[in-house]
Image (spheres, rainbow, N blue to C red):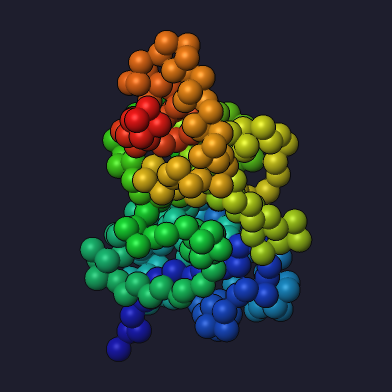
Amino acid sequence: MKEEGILFIVALPIGNLKDITLRALEILKTVDFILTEDTRSFKKLERAYNLPKRELISFYREVEVEKEEKIIGLLKEGKKIALCSEAGTPLLSDPGARLVKRAHLEGIKVEPIPGASALTLALSASGIDLSKGFIFLGFLPRKEKEIKERLKRLPEDMPLVLFIPPHRFSKTIKVLLEILGDRTAFLAREMTKFHEEFTFTCLSELARRENLKGEITLIIEGKEEKNLKSPFFTKKELESEIKELLREGLKIKEISKTLSKRYGISSKEIYHYIKTIKR
């Protein structure tokens, strides 16, 4: 009886090679083929753990469609294949979703091997309340117009999580600041590596940073999470600014709208706060 093929979805370390699981190593030693987004990166892991040589199939976004039939064919022949992204858990903003779905539709067994993920690691280190859930955006589009289109359809009260390439960090933050206002944010950079950074900050502060290097995961709090007790300004500072704008003759609605964009607080909340000041 012919042995059935299995497609293993294998999570790899996101930086520190010691974060590989024993089960992942076991699978990588026994499969017939390994699909990898970056063969050079995988060979570092191969050398670190003295893994037996397996045929590596380069499997990145631009070739996944053309290689799909060959891989499905190998699985139907009974081959065992490991799908790995360059780092972390496959399919989270990495190629492979099409292949995995095809395997399910063809009745081929799919077996995930859990492990490291930049998404879950950043969330667990952030301290941000996730009781209402969160929205994972992966990598945003390159064009500013497309970013705005994607963000305007999202609820404002939920945390947003996204990956940002270092060469696009400055531009992306400025667009986010313009669209979302100055929200609280958590920056996770180079996680598990020597230059690891975890910073609780806000978008306006991040807009001042330049030449960031390494892999970046950013978590932006939902609007309702930021209130008059925000660590980035005091009630006294806000009240002083409100009184100054009132002296200049601005109406309450105008002040509410202006400060809402500046501080990332709902205009309704500021409106009610102004009313308490004027009593």
Above or below, comparing residue 64 to residue 179 in the picture: below
Q: Residue furthest right?
A: 194
Most foreground residue, 163 or 203: 203
Most foreground residue, 41 or 53: 41
Q: Quadrant of residue 252?
A: top left
Q: Quadrant of residue 174?
A: top right
Q: What residue is drawn where x is 55% and y is 55%?
A: 37
Q: Residue furthest bottom?
A: 1
Q: Is residue 213 left or right of residue 65?
A: right
How far across and down, in percent of the image, does residue 83 sit?
47, 65
Q: What residue is drawn where x is 34% and y is 30%?
A: 279
Total marks placed: 0
- The N terminus is located in which quarter? bottom left
How far across and down, in percent of the image, does residue 135 sit?
37, 50
Q: What residue is drawn where x is 71% and y is 61%?
A: 193
Query: Can residue 147 be seen in the rendering of this structure?
Result: no
Above or below, comparing residue 179 to residue 157 in the picture: above
Q: Residue furthest front?
A: 279
Q: Is residue 47 left or right of residue 259?
A: right
Query: Can residue 232 be seen in the rendering of this structure?
Result: yes
Above or below, comparing residue 158 to residue 132 in the picture: above
How far across and down, in percent of the image, does residue 182 sit?
50, 34
Above or below, comparing residue 63 to residue 11 in the picture: above
Most foreground residue, 95 or 30: 95
Most foreground residue, 220 or 22: 220
How far across and down, in percent of the image, does residue 150 sit?
35, 34
Q: What residue is drawn where x is 68% and y is 55%?
A: 197
